Each structure stands twice: as structure tokens, then as C-alpha cells.
Image (cartoon, rainbow, N blue to C red):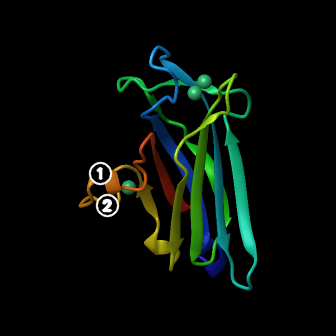
Amino acid sequence: MTEQSAKRIKVVLQWLQILDNLEPAFKEKGEFRFRSKVWGEREGGTKIIQQTQFPEKGYWSISDHPAWNKKDKLDRVVFEGEVDEHLVVEFFGEELDTFSANDQLDHYQREFRGPVEGWLGRYGPGEDLPEDVPSDDPESMTNWRICYIIERA
Ligand SMILES: [Ca+2]
Ligand SMILES: [Ca+2]
Ligand SMILES: [Ca+2]
């Protein structure tokens, strides 16, 4: 493997889960749209930024009922490229409302520094920080949870 290909990684969103549908109590499902922004600073000061939106059109109706609040098997590539010891993964989500401003889910941001080998893995609630209290886990936010993988591309 060359030095170049060693730096090539993929960030793949596995699943997301809604803990609060941000709707009045009588409404079971919210209308959600999501966005990712994954970026890194590279040697020489250039920045690489990749952004995606999902779903591509419209929205996903997602309940916050614990039995069916998970959007599973997404397998969505949100970044693929070469990085230089720096990567920031951000996710945004909003719940669409007709008669008022859309509701925003918590902003997710996590920064990785140092050799790429050190970050490869799975980042989900309780999965990379097993000794952590679940509420301190960055992938477990107040109103949603996410799980993604950083792997070699
Ligand atoms: Ca709402
Ligand atoms: Ca709504
Ligand atoms: Ca975690």
C-alpha cells in the first residue's frame, strides 16, 4: 500500500435513531431531513469538505416510539477521500414544520487528529467509549443518536 492510498478513508453512516420527534404529543411521526459535513485540513493548509443531504428528495417520516424510531441499514457514504491527520465529522437534522420554523436536532460534531490508523472504527452510542456514561457519549445526543464507521477506502 502506498503512502497515498493509506490516507484514503470512507465515512459511512450506519443508522440513526430519533429520541424526540419534535412534534406535539398527539403526532406519532416527524418529517425529517438530514445533512452531513465532513471535512479536514490537509498539509499545506488546504481544506477538503464533502457535504451530503438525505433523503435526496422530500423527507423521512420517523416516529420517536422506542420500538420503531430507528432508520437502520443506511450504509450511506458521507465522505470518501484522502485526509492528513485531521477530520471533522458533523451531522445536522431538522424536523419540518409548516406553520412555524423547522425544529433542529442537536448538532453533532466530532474531531479526529493524529494518524488515521487511530480513528478507524465504529462510532455509535457506547461503542467506542465503553467505560463512558451513555449520556456523555457524543453519538448519543438529547434528541437523536447516530452510528457511523470510519474505514479505509
Ligand atoms: Ca415540529
Ligand atoms: Ca413537522
Ligand atoms: Ca460513542
At horizontal 49% and vertical 43% (from top left) the residue drawn is 14
Mark 2 lies within 8 Å of ligand 3 (Cβ measured): yes
Q: Earlier in the sequence, mark 1 or mark 2?
A: 2
Question: Which residue is the extreme one toward the front?
Answer: 100
Q: Residues within 10 Å of mark 1 (few under 14, many from 20)?
A: some
SS category of the residue bearing label 2: loop
Where residue 146 sits: x, y (%)? 46, 45
**Residue 121 visible from this viewpoint:** yes
* Mark number, residue 129: 2
**Residue 153 visible from this viewpoint:** no
Quadrant of ligand 1: it is top right
Where residue 67 sits: x, y (%)? 35, 23
Q: Amino acid at mark 1?
A: Pro
**Residue 122 sits above or below residue 116 on the image:** above
Nearest the viewer among 106 and 81 is 106
Q: Amino acid at mark 2?
A: Leu
SS category of the residue bearing label 1: helix
Where residue 89 sits: x, y (%)? 57, 59
At horizontal 55% and vertical 24% (from top left) the residue drawn is 30
Residue tagged 1: 134
Q: Is residue 5 left or right of residue 119?
A: right
Where residue 12 sits: x, y (%)? 55, 50
Q: Which quarter of the rendered picture does the C terminus lie within?
A: bottom right
Mark 1 lies within 8 Å of ligand 3 (Cβ measured): no
